[in-house]
Each structure stands twice: as structure tokens, then as C-alpha cells.
Image (tube, rainbow, N blue to C red):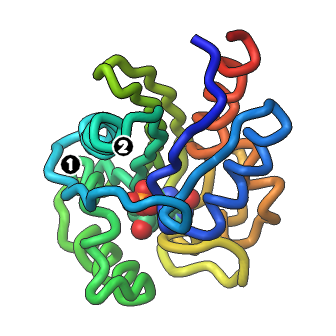
Amino acid sequence: MRISEILFASHNAGKIKEIKQMLEPLGISVKTAADMDFPDVEETGSTFAENSLLKSQTIAAAIGIPCLADDSGLCVDALDGAPGVYSARYAPNRDFDKGMDKLLAAMAQSENKSRKAHFSCVISLAYPDGKYNLFEGRVDGVIAEHKMPGAEGFGYDPLFIPDGYDVSFAQMSKEDKNKISHRGRAMRQFKDFLTSM
Ligand code: IMP
């Protein structure tokens, strides 16, 4: 099916800019909350795919055009995969400095001393008839003992050291992070899918 218009269900200005830059050259017009109203969907799923699909399928059915949504988060082995789908809510008042302290404290108390962790991202594209496509990306790494310095990034970036590197995501340029990140990988899969249509 040829797509000419997509609603991107995100309020994040950075993600909106990125998606527009990727889709507009392919002749796909990207609508956002600034162009049309769409329902707020509660993220009640227990996986990134469920949450991503909850958003895209509900909204695509409500507005009648394809909808793109994403869900992502950090999964820590020593915490049995937490904070996972609760990554945003795990940080008190969405204060990620406090959220990182909370994570380090929880790891210090865990009997499992592994520092392994990964970020996951699932992008879903849902059509008004309920059909959908999923694009998944993951990056493995370790949680640093302390927050690493570095002004780049957001969320838990100062704690995450990707495998093969000795700096955290917060010390990498946006471009370098994007080459290996969960979101970058999921986005490239999505782009490959669109260009092969
Ligand atoms: P959402 O997918 O926008 O709902 O993001 C979920 C949460 O996961 C964010 O609020 C961040 O806490 C965390 N997260 C997702 N991706 C990243 C990343 O690339 N770096 C740091 N934190 C991230």
C-alpha cells in the first residue's frame, strides 16, 4: 500500500523533527498534534510492542489515516528488566537525575551484581483497518557505577555505556549515538520498509 500521509503520535519535538526529515523526502506528509486532534492513549501494556501498538492502532482507527507510534525504555538485568516499559514513570516527577540515583540504589541493593542492560525501541505503523507493521531496535551495554559527565542526550543516557565503548550515551554526539542506538536501529528498519514499498 502506498502511503501519502501519516500521523505521528508523539509530542516530543526532537522525534517529530527526525521523523519529518526522514519521511517528507519520500513524499509522505507527516501530521502531528499540531494538525489534528487525536485521543490520548494510556500505556497499559507490559511490553514495548504492546504499548506502541496500543497508541498507533487506537489512533489510526479513530482518525482514519495510518498512525506511527513508538515506545522505548531501559531494561536492566540485575533488576529483572526494570524499569522497562516504566522507564519514564520510574523517574520521580520525570526528573531523570533522581531516576538515575534511584536506579543505582536499586542495583546496589540487588543480589544480582550484573551491570548488563539494554535499551529497546519498538516503532509501530498501524492502518485504520487494524493491520500493522513493527520495527524493533535494541542496543546492549552496561550501567556505569556513577553518572558519567557529558551534556549530550537525555533520560538515562549518562548511565548507559554501549558495548564496545568506554563512554556513555551522554558523551556521544547525536549522530554517533544514532548509528548504534535502539531508536536509530528501529528507524532505519522503518525507512528500509518504506523505501521498499
Ligand atoms: P518514550 O518511548 O518516549 O515513552 O520514552 C520512554 C523513556 O525511556 C524515556 O522517558 C527515557 O527515560 C527512556 N529512554 C528511551 N530512550 C532513551 C535513550 O535513548 N536514552 C535515555 N533514555 C531513554
Say which of 52 and 162 sits in front.
52
At horizontal 77% and vertical 65% (from top left) the residue drawn is 172
State the quadrant of the C terminus: top right
From the viewer's perspective, is the residue at label 2 or at label 1 nearer?
Answer: 2
Apparent side of residue 5 relative to residue 53 in the rendered image (left or right): right
**Residue 145, image x, y percentages:** 48, 73
Mark 1: amino acid:
Asp
Does residue 111 sit above or below 80 in this rendering? below
**Residue 71, image x, y percentages:** 40, 49
Q: How many dots with numbers?
A: 2
Occupied quadrant, residue 108:
bottom left
Q: Secondary structure at mark 1?
A: loop
Residue position for label 2:
63
Mark 2: amino acid:
Ile
Occupied quadrant, residue 56:
top left
Q: Secondary structure at mark 2?
A: helix
At horizontal 64% and vertical 37% (from top left) the residue drawn is 187
At horizontal 34% and vertical 69% (from top left) the residue drawn is 88
Say which of 14 and 1 sits in front.
1
Which numbered tag is attached to residue 122?
A: none
Tell me if residue 143 can be seen: no
Residue position for label 1:
80
Tell me if residue 150 can be seen: yes
Does residue 132 sit above or below 37 in this rendering? above
